[in-house]
Image (tube, rainbow, N blue to C red):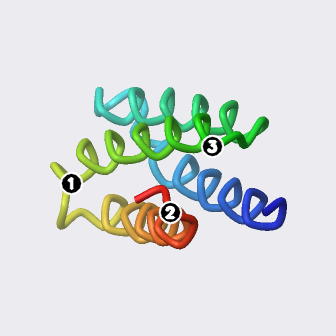
Amino acid sequence: MNSEIAKALEYITAIEQIIKPYEYEVPEASHCLKDLRAIKELLKNPTWDNIAQAVEKLKTIETRINYYRGYEAAEEALIYINKLKNMARNHGFL
C-alpha cells in the first residue's frame, strides 16, 4: 500500500503542477490546489476514513476541472485524476 500511496502522491503533484499556473486567473484552480493539499495531508495517515475523504475531495476537483474540458491543461489533469480514481476503485473506495 505504501508504494500505492507514493504513486498517488506523484499523481497529485503532477496535477498541482498542471493547474498551478492558473491559480490566480481561475478561481477553481486555487480551490483545487487547496483540496489537493488536503488530500496530501489525508494520505500521510492512510486510514480507510482518510482515503475515503480524499476520494470525495478528488471527485470535487474532477467536477471543477470538468468545467474546463477541451483545454489542454484540464485534459491533462483529468488523465491523472482518472489514474487516481482507478487506484481508488481497485482498493474498493469507488
Give the residue drawn at x 18%, y 67%: 70
Q: Is residue 29 left or right of residue 26?
A: right
19 up-or-down from 35: above or below: below
Query: Label 1 vs label 3: CA separation?
Result: 27 Å
Q: Please tell me whether mark 2 or mark 1 is closer to you in this view.
A: 2
Q: Which residue is mark 1?
A: 66
Circle 3 crowding by C-alpha within 10 Å: few under 14, some 14–19, many from 20: few
17 up-or-down from 1: above or below: above
Q: Is residue 27 left or right of residue 68?
A: right
Residue 54 is situated, as x and y percent measured from the top left of the image, at: 52, 40
Asked if marks 2 and 1 touch (Cβ < 8 Å), the reply is no
Type of residue at label 2? Gly
Q: In the image shown, does 14 or 4 lie closer to the viewer?
A: 4
Q: Which residue is mark 2?
A: 92
- Disc 2, SS: loop
Give the residue drawn at x 41%, y 68%: 82
Give the residue drawn at x 53%, y 73%: 90
Q: Is residue 15 left or right of residue 22?
A: right
Q: Which residue is mark 3?
A: 48
Q: In the image shown, does 19 or 36 lie closer to the viewer?
A: 36
Residue 74 is situated, as x and y percent measured from the top left of the image, at: 32, 59
- Disc 1, SS: helix
Type of residue at label 1? Asn
Q: Is residue 26 left or right of residue 41?
A: left
